[in-house]
Amino acid sequence: MRRGIFILGLLALAGLVGMSGWLGGTSSLGQPPKPFLIVVDAGHGGEDTGAIGLAGLIEKNLVLDIVRLIQIKALNEPKLKVWLTRQEDKYIAPKDRIALANAQKADLYISVHANYASDPFVRGIETLIHESASAASKAWAQALQQKLIEETSAKNRGVKSAPLYLRDAQMPAALVEVGFVTNPEEANNLQQLTYQTAIAEAILAAAKDFLKIE
Ligand SMILES: [Zn+2]
C-alpha cells in the first residue's frame, strides 16, 4: 500500500513536470514560466546631454521618451519584462549600465541613442555592436535594424561595429541610433509621438522575434 501511494505520487509529479514542459517554461515546478527580461537603456542623462539637434531636440530627453514608450507597450506582453537603466534625467556610467544588466541576468540588452552629423543631409537609422560581438549580438542587431526600417521607412544605414562599452555584456547586446537630430526631416519626425511609438513598437517586435515569443 505504501508503495502504491509512492507510485501514485511519482505519476502526479511526472504529470506536473510534463505540464510545465508543455507550457514551455523553464521555471521550477508549479511556477508559471518566467518572462524574458530585456534591459532597455536610454543613452546619456544628467549633465551628459548627448547630441543637441534642431528645434531644441536633446538626445538624452528624446531617448528617455522612447524607452518609456517601450516599457508601456511591454505591459501588454506577459512573456516579456522590460527593465530601464534610467527612469529619469540622471547620468549613469556606461559600464554600470552593463553591470546592472549582467546582474539582472537579462536575456537581451538594447541601448537607445540618436545620432549627430555636422552635415544636415545625413540621415537614417543604424545599429551598432561591439567589434568583437558574438553571433547572437549580431543576429539581435540585424533583427532590430530590419524591424526599425520596416516600421519607420527611414534610410537603412545598416549594422556597424564600433568600439563600444557593450563588450562586457553577457547577453546579446546592441545600440540603436534612431535617427539624426541634425537632419530637419528626422528631427521633426523624432518629436512626433506617432514616430516615437513606431520606434518603440519596432524594438519590441524585434525582441519578440529574436526570443521567439508569439
Ligand atoms: Zn548617444
Image: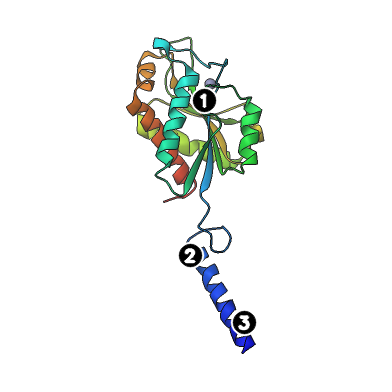
Residue underneath mark 2: 22
- Where does label 3 land, which residue? 6
Classify mark 2: residues with Cα within 10 Å, few (<14), some (14-19) or many (20+): few
Asked if residue 8 is positioned above or below residue 23 in the image, the reply reads below
Q: What's under tag 3, amino acid-wise?
A: Phe
Q: Residues within 10 Å of mark 1 (few under 14, many from 20)?
A: some
Residue at figure coordinates x 35%, y 17% from the top left: 188
The residue closer to the viewer here, 181 or 121, is: 181
Say which of marks 2 and 3 sits in front: 3
Mark closest to the chain's N terminus, 1 or 2: 2
Mark 1 element type:
loop
* Residue 18 picture location, percent across and down: 52, 69
Q: Which residue is mark 1?
A: 88
The three-letter amino acid code for the residue at tag 1 is: Glu
Give the mark nearest the N terminus, 1 or 3: 3
Residue 170 showing in the rendered view: no
The Cα–Cα distance between marks 1 and 2, rounded to whole angstroms, is 40 Å
Q: Position of residue 7 (x, y in %)?
A: 60, 82
Q: Nearer the viewer, mark 1 or mark 2?
A: 1
SS state under label 3 = helix
Residue located 38% across and 19% down the image: 186
Residue 152 % position (x, y): 36, 29
